Image (tube, rainbow, N blue to C red):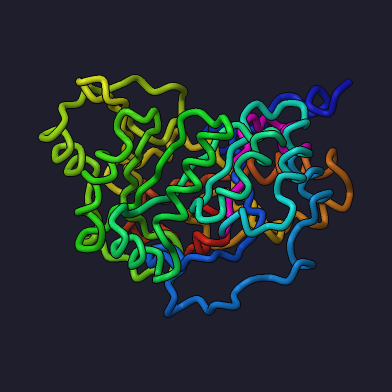
Amino acid sequence: MSLAQQLQPLPHDRLGRPLHDLRLSVIEACNFRCGYCMPADRIPDDHGLDAAGRLSFAQIETLVRGFAAIGVRKLRLTGGEPLLRKRLPELVARLARIPGIEDLALTTNASLLAGQARALREAGLRRITVSLDALEPAAFARMSGGRGEIGAVLDGIAAAEAAGFGALKINCVVQRGANEDQVLPLLERFRGSGHVVRFIEYMDVGTCNGWDPAQVVSSRELRDRIAARWPLRPLQAQYRGEVAERYAFVDGGGEVGFVSSVSAPFCGDCHRARVSADGRLYTCLFAGQGHDLRPALAQGEAWLAGHVAGLWGRRGDRYSEIRGRPQAPRKHIEMYLIGG
């Protein structure tokens, strides 16, 4: 009898939501300092754990096997910047062989992707999402905290294409007065390429980004602005809980997505868990505290699976639906510790 069969039925939280996706941070360090995530004036250059503070590859494999046993089918590797983790393709190869994991993806700023894309593809990585907040070089440098060059990112995207990755997702966090003028240029660059640009509302993740609701550009506003240039038609969601609303360009130029966590919360269908590089489980992107999984990990995947199932069963998170209310948590984990 498999571990998954032993643990049936699969866990649901207090709001009836199953656990289906795991977003796993492999490193908390990043080579960028994007203002909405890891601002340079708040996070020092030498930020990060030493290697001993992060889960080892063996621990990560045990962890993912345990999560797969209780229903996780989609695994996304995040950071920080995951390409900073040494020997990442080796880890990908180990995770790609785990029964039950049907989709293995990576979110990256792509600045280091050119040198690793082919190895990641050969190791079994299936999909890549690139965080890209501007196309114009000066704007890109500003949005990355003066740390990034757009040329390196575009080289990384080209390398991913050459390695055989299909449609990439290009994620852009839009802040009013910061990069909203980059929306149409990004679409102009990637329309017709097969890649999908997705615009994400600026969120109050963490506590160090100085979030101001006046800087939120709503998806509705962006959609109207884009449709005035290129008419759009809505598309059906590909699966329940898909975070992005999908639209196709009427002229056949591909599609565009909108993630509206502020203006149109989707907590009711959220089935994602997040684990930090040091092995703490967060049941919401806006959680204030995590659960240390290392003691359960030390007991093996079956013990871990049962422990996580119990934690998930007590989950009641729905921060985006209660944002601004007295019961909403005031302190959130920083986004760079658990990915987006």
Total marks shown come to 0
Compare residues 27 and 229 and report the one nearer the observer.
Answer: 229
Q: Position of residue 113 (x, y in %)?
A: 56, 49
Q: Which contiguous range is marked in magenta?
A: 65-80
As for residue 189 lying within the magenta part, the answer is no
x and y percentages locating residue 28 in the rendered image: 61, 63
Name the quarter where the N terminus is drawn: top right
At a point 29% along the width and 44% down the height, the residue shown is 186
User: Image check: 93 left or right of 177?
Assistant: right
In x, y percent, where is residue 37?
Answer: 44, 63
Q: Nearer the viewer, residue 210 or 183?
A: 183
Identify whether 20 is placed above or below 214.
above
Q: Nearer the viewer, residue 156 or 6?
A: 156
Q: Nearer the viewer, residue 207 or 230?
A: 230
Residue 112 lies in quadrant: bottom right
Residue at 60% in and 78% down = 46
Residue 38, image x, y percentages: 46, 68
Left or right of 328: which side holds 6? right
Tell me which corner region of the image, top left, top right, bottom left or bottom right, holds residue 139: bottom left
Q: Residue at x 40, y 71 (%)?
A: 146
Residue drawn at the location 69% of the way across and 28% of the way down:
10
Q: Is residue 48 above or below residue 24?
A: below
